[in-house]
Amino acid sequence: MVDDAKRPDGRTEIKRSNPPIQEGWDIHLECGLSPDCTHDSQGRIHKLHGHPAVVEDSRMLFSAEYIDFDEDAQEMHAKGGVYYHNFENNEKIWCDELWYHTEHGNEHGWFEGNVAGETQPRIITKPGILTSTEPFHFEGEWAERLGAKYILYNGWVTDCTMPKPWWRLTGPRFDIVPKVSAIAHKATFRLRGIPIFYFPWFYRPLQREPRKSGLLLPEPGHSSVRGFTLAAGYFWAINRSYDLTYRGEAFTSGSLTHHVEFRGKPKDGTDFDMIFFGAQDRSTTPGAPTYSGFSLTMVGHSDLGDGWIARGSLSYISSFRFQQDWTQSFNEAIGSEIHSTGFIDKNLSTFTLDVVASRTQNYQTSEIEVTNPETNQVSYLSDAVTIRKMPEVQLSSRDHNLVTIAGLPIWFSFESSAGLLFRSEPFFDANNNLISTFKTSPFTDRIRFAPHVTTAFQLGGIHFVPSMGIDETFYSESQEPYLGNYQAVGTNIVRSARDFSLDVVFPTLERTYDTKSFLGEKLKHVIEPRVTYKYVTGIGDDFNRFIRFDENDLLSNTNEVEISLANRFYAKKGKDIREVFTWEIAQKRYFDTTFGGALISGQRNVFDSTADLTGYAFLIGPRSTSPVVSTFRASPINGLSIQWQADYDPRVRAIVNSTMSVDYRWKKKYLISGGNNEVHNSPLLTPYANQFRGRVGYGDTQHRGWNAAVDFVYDYRQHVLLYTTTQVTYNTDCCGLSVQYRRYNVGIRDETLEYFSLSIANIGNIGNLKKQDRLF
């Protein structure tokens, strides 16, 4: 038996109520014993007249007013309100007349007169892709089926809600292979009936791995500096394991950019992604500088087997000026550090072995501009600090039980490394003249071994964790003062440090409140006091002879105690317990105010014992106390997150460094985010700064209707809006249109850019607004 149902366009759809369970055809009339219904049979040849007449088996169903069906020849002819349903691929077709050959594996047929059909699409749930559960709908003058392929003539397709779709792709011919591909010939994309794009040939893969070579859609755009743009490209699916994408962009100013991405997955557990971006800046604006160059980034991972893992990330830019001027990321425009790291890693019980190769560049400014007084020609010199490890072998062990003496467990751990390192750094005077360049040999030896023993015991409810160890480090080169800076000298030097620490953990104070509140049924307050004493000796004023390659070279003499206090509030709702408020404060007391003579008055000093307390430097002279470091975190309700880290300096009785952020999202559609980063310590330590960031948004990628968001970074001291982005999106049931305005005013860059994107549900995006650049 079948039931009738009406679709939005008024056509009848037959829904199964009792599908046939036996093999063969079920041939019957739904109109029962009505005199207008007839069923004439001559052997296995059937002539049916009714409303409706139905022929079905486990694979498919036919319904119409008139059906002639020859079971032996497996030929079907149907007229009048024809409905066809293929259950294997969930395909439905309506038409006025049908001829169909039903032989399994050799199906073919013709559909004529007001042909309409639909099939369920493959839902794509990737980030930034609009999704829809609406069926894929098509209509045309006539259609035919040849094996697994359907060919639609003089028609159109859409995946919008019928009967008034937002978009249609119209054309003289469509080749559709369900679950494989769809091809449109000489097609026009229409939005609300308005032609937007013309495609001589359009291919859309429908299989689970939709990768096929082809031209990418053109992408227009605009830049206030370089004029209008047009981008185009090609995607090459080399094979199942590799593909390559090229995208070129031309500007009316004459500039060109090239974007090449090469991806691969040679085997299970191994993949890589490499991106090259190059720009030929041919700006014709009088007096405007040009910034040609290129960047190269790569990430990769490989499971080498037997516990060995290889990972790597490479970043290289030809100049920092180039990156500032061409990047589409605000963080890259202001980020002056470029990191490249590769390592091979294996864990062996408590041991970890790493083989590391890395390169780090830290640009002090965008570059130094130098003018030749004789030719008046301007050139640019990089002022980047460059550090390389080529390579370094690191072997370490976390704490493991060595022996137990008189009931006291003794744990042993160590860190060790041996590598070939390099560092270079140029020095300029106030007039941008190059004074000197600090440079080590290309392969400077550094060998380090730092074992430690630790134990733990308890007295009167107080936990004591003492630890002691040594740190022996050999350098094949050292540094000495030169022209007000330093130079590398080929002198072997050994750093022999001895250290002792005692961690004292006091009993936790706690109290539970049974009063109900918006936080929960119960609230628990926990106070965790802690004191840590640390003593390091053996380095003294030799500290400034050691070349700085990484944080291991910041170790100095110290005699200090750190006092910290943590306040935590836990809330219980039902069986759910979560930490809703945390406030931690810490301060160090230095008994050795010169750190063994390593401190140099009147300049910025950074030691291991200051860097592990706060990320802001605070030493420009001897001092016995550090700033009070406060860290506050709160999540009182779902969707709300508050963080505030501040350094209070008792010397000036003020907060000298502060970083705050507040983020709130509710009902999955509303977003408010803000933050402030303020530094007003001594300018000898860090330049003054006071910057605000904010984001306000409504909606998301899938929200139907209007969506809007604005993002900004404002420098209060300079009274400059450094960066802003505004995006407006309107999503229908099947498509969405996004427009984004982006403004840069960072360093040498003052530019406005416009982007747009047209999203087609379950298909993809058209336009120059990439998913990684969207605000939602």
Image (cartoon, helix red, strand yellow):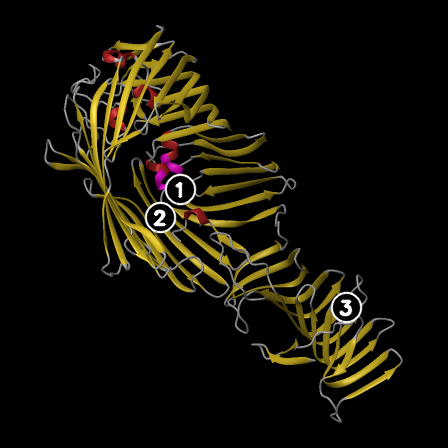
Indicate the secondary structure of the residue bearing disc 1.
loop
736 displayed left or right of 565: right
Q: Residue at label 1?
A: 328
Tags 3 and 2 touching, CB below 8 Å:
no
Which image quarter: residue 587? top left
The residue lying furthest to the top in this view is 491
Q: Main secondary structure of the magenta part?
A: helix
Give how far across and how far down residue 760 sits, in percent. Answer: 52, 59
Give how far across and how far down residue 515 sits, in percent. Answer: 22, 60
Which image quarter: residue 503? top left
Give how far across and how far down residue 157 sits, in percent. Answer: 60, 65
Which image quarter: residue 478? top left
The disc placed on residue 742 is 2
592 displayed left or right of 405: left
**Magenta stretch?**
324-331
Instruction: Measure how far apart labels 1 and 2 are at the Cα level.
Output: 9 Å
Instruction: Measure how far apart labels 3 and 2 are at the Cα level.
Output: 54 Å
Tags 1 and 2 touching, CB below 8 Å:
yes
536 displayed left or right of 339: left
Tags 3 and 1 touching, CB below 8 Å:
no
- Sequence-wise, the earlier of marks 3 and 1 is 3
Q: Residue at label 3?
A: 109
Indicate the secondary structure of the residue bearing disc 3.
strand
At a point 39% along the width and 32% down the height, the residue shown is: 322
What's the residue type where badge 1 is placed? Gln
Give how far across and how far down residue 55 sits, in percent. Answer: 76, 77
Residue 671 visible within the image: no
109 to 205, vertically: above or below: below
What's the residue type where badge 3 is placed? Gly
249 to 122, vertically: above or below: above
